[in-house]
Image: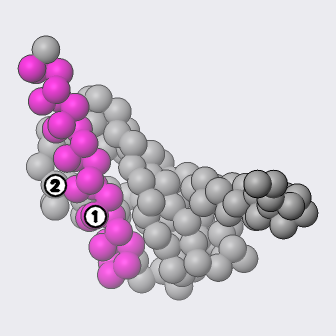
Amino acid sequence: MKKQRNGYARIDRVKEQITRELAELVRKGLKDPRAGFITINDVEVTRDYSYATVYYTVLDEQTRDVTEEALEHAKGFLRSELSKRITVFRTPELHFVYDESLERGMAISSLIEQVAAEKPVED
């Protein structure tokens, strides 16, 4: 049982390290003008570290498509730089996915506020 806990702790540490390193690489290392203000929200890594899904958002929703193109174009560079910064047997292949959870959360929050404003609170 102890082995599993350590395994999960290791994968969590790797996820956090990949998130930090990618955030810095995206901020400082990408020279592509299409890559605007990108925020790396989360990373999911397979157990064998061969594949990482990187969830990101952009500051300006209108740049979402060109940012996706920029990240896809820079995928090889980012993986190569990541391999120099983290210590794992295999540097994961990166797959970028736009994170819509923040937008969904804001929409739900807005709906709740609308309902709360329409319905008087009963004591």
The stretch in magenta equals 2-29
- Label 1 belongs to which residue? 20
Compared across the picture, whether 115 is left or right of 1 comes to right
Q: Which is more N-terminal, label 2 or label 1?
A: 1
- State which quadrant residue 51 falls in: top left
Compared across the picture, whether 36 is left or right of 17 comes to right
Where residue 81 sits: x, y (%)? 25, 64
Where residue 49 sits: x, y (%)? 27, 36
Disc number lying in front (1 or 2): 1
Q: Amino acid at mark 1?
A: Arg
Q: In the rendering, which numbered label is found on residue 86?
A: 2
Residue 84 can be seen, yes or no = yes
Which secondary structure is most common in the magenta stretch?
A: helix
Q: Amino acid at mark 2?
A: Ile
Q: Is residue 73 magenta?
A: no
Dot 1 lies on which element? helix
| Other residues around mark 1 within 10 Å, as few (<14) / some (14–19) / many (≥20) | some
What residue sits 33% from the left and 81% below the top? 28
Q: Nearer the viewer, residue 115 or 104?
A: 115
